Every structure is written in C-alpha cells, then in structure tokens.
Image (cartoon, rainbow, N blue to C red):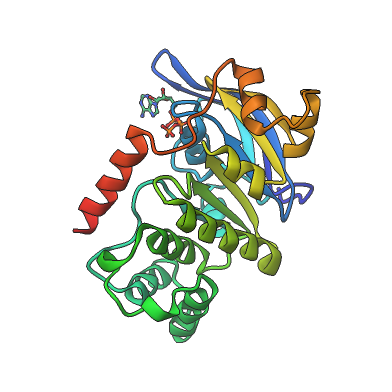
Amino acid sequence: MQHRQSMIEVVDLVKQFGDYTAVDAVSFQVAEGEVFGLLGPNGAGKSTTIKMLTTLLPPTGGQATVVGYDILRHANAVRRHIGYVPQALSADGSLTGRENLLVFASLYDLPRATRKAKAQEVLTFMGLTDVADRLVRTYSGGMIRRLEIAQAMLHNPQVLFLDEPTVGLDPVARKAVWEHLEQIRTQTGMTIFLTTHYMEEADNLCDHVAIMHQGKIVALDTPNALKAQLKTPNATLDDVFAHYTGNTLESGGSYRDTARTRRTARRLG
Ligand SMILES: Nc1ncnc2c1ncn2[C@@H]1O[C@H](COP(=O)(O)OP(=O)(O)OP(=O)(O)O)[C@@H](O)[C@H]1O
C-alpha cells in the first residue's frame, strides 16, 4: 500500500456536484520535497481538489494516494501524515497564539510532555515568538497566516496542504509567508501543495505548476518550462495562463479577496 515514488499521485480524479463537474478527470504527481502549485482563477476547482486530497470531500471518480495511502480506503492514515491550512480562518481570535498551538497539539494528540516545547519550536520557526502571548485578534493578517501554518506543522506532517495561503494579504505580508514556506521546505524537506491565483506566488515558490481551468488541468510543468514553451521573449506566467485559457488572472485586490479579508477581520472581532 505504501509506495514512495511520489508523495501525491492523482489519477483521473473527478468531483461532481449534481450535474456540475467541478473537477474533471485531473491527473498529476508530486515528488517528495517539492513545492507544487495548483494555479487557477476563482471557481477553477482548486479548493475542491485540495479538499478531496485532504479527505474532507469524497471524490466522484478516479483515484489518489497521499504519502502512499489511498484517500478513500486509508483516509485516517492520510490525515495523520498531512497538515492542512484551509482558506477559512482556523485560529481562535480570543486565544493567544501559543494557546491556539496548545489546542492543536492536544487535537493532534502529541505527547503531553512535548506540547509546550513543540509549540515554542513552531512559534520560533514561523517568526512569532514576540507575539506568542498576545491575543490573536490583535494580529495582522500575515501573522495569523503564519500562526495557521505553525498549527498545521505541529505534528511534523510529510505533506503540507495550503489553500490560497496569501489571499487578502498585502505584498509585504505575502513575501513573509513565502519566505517561511521556503524555509519549511529547505529545513524540513516537507512536501508542499498549495493552490493560488497569484502568478507571482506560483513563479516564486513552486517547482511545478499545474494550471487549472474549468475543472481541467490544461498545462503542467516548471514555471520556466511553461514560459519557455510560449516562445515569446520574456513571457510571464500571466502570458502562459492567457495562452492556455484565453483569460487573464487578476493580480489580487479583487472584491472577493477584500470580502475574505473583511470576513477574517470580523471573525477576529
Ligand atoms: N459544495 C458545492 N456544491 C455545489 N457546487 C460547488 C460546491 N463546492 C464548489 N462548487 C462549485 O465548484 C466549482 C469549483 O469550486 P472551487 O471552490 O473548487 O474553485 P476554486 O478554484 O478553489 O476557486 P475559489 O478560489 O473560489 O475557491 C465552482 O463553480 C463552485 O461554485
């Protein structure tokens, strides 16, 4: 059951909601230690794909393994080996950062004697030591995101899934999240799977990028290879996206991003 050629293997994965096909026979592989980006506009099927791979949503068809375990037959084993940072807020604004981590440490059932030290370790790793004992509702959006990543790393998962990790963040906060993700990859060797609709994010962080459009993967390669295939001088990933889908992606600051940011602020009180 456990085979290690790749950390994620997806074959013809399908998700239908009624008559609507949100994910349409998607196939790809993610090698151990790489950062893999699923890039696409709102509604492309990215979140639905990540929810199936994290065992939150059963597929309608196809197969997938994560860390060698089948997402349907061995869902519990998948859950033990992955970390997940959802789009929706996963930190409690009325607790401190450290308290949030201790809640997650107990949820993951880490040995009691190790919980405090492990919380401190991930706080340091994500650059949150100075604010660890402040209420999360006083954190900036970027700090909250880094705390959520810290929460998802507590049990040393082999694959970290992040759904739009920097949506709604300003460019400085976004860059800080990128730097920390890069550090996770180099220092822990963790495999990282993220969804994004930011070209710059995919270009900066990802070893491989799959472009998703209307439920299908229309291109998959390294960012440089995707750009080189266009044969246009100085092609960008935006050009690649336009080439494969006939559309351009907004570069952020959309109504939807703003709505999400406001929702986050409101929930933190
Ligand atoms: N539970 C559901 N029931 C019906 N339709 C759904 C459901 N979840 C998602 N969809 C539809 O499936 C399509 C893909 O949604 P999905 O959330 O996967 O897209 P996305 O690429 O992640 O975009 P976003 O950034 O908006 O989350 C959308 O058209 C969405 O409306």
Count all numbered tags in the image, as a single digit. 0
Q: Nearer the viewer, residue 159 or 137?
A: 137
Decide if residue 248 is in sight here: yes
Whole-percent x and y of residue 198? 53, 39
Extreme left residue here? Answer: 269
Quadrant holding the C terminus: bottom left
Residue at position x 64%, y 60% in the image: 182
Q: Is residue 23 left or right of residue 187?
A: left
Judging depth in this view, the residue of 197 and 187 nearest the camera is: 197
Residue positioned most to the top = 19
- Above/below status of 191 relative to 49: below
Figure quadrant of residue 235: top right
Q: Is residue 222 visible?
A: no
In the displayed orientation, state which residue is furthest to the bottom: 113
Instruction: Give the quadrant of residue 73.
Output: top right
Residue 256 in the image: above or below residue 172: above
Q: Is residue 267 left or right of residue 143?
A: left
Who's the residue at 32% across and 75% down the image? 99
Name the spot of residue 152 as percent of width and height, x first: 48, 61
Q: Is residue 8 above or below residue 213?
A: below
Q: Residue at x 65, y 60 (%)?
A: 190
Q: Residue at x 79, y 47 (%)?
A: 5
Quarter of the displayed picture in which ligand 1 can be seen: top left
On the image, the x and y values in percent for residue 29 come to: 71, 39
154 lies left or right of 224: left
Give coordinates of residue 96: x percent, y percent. Answer: 30, 74
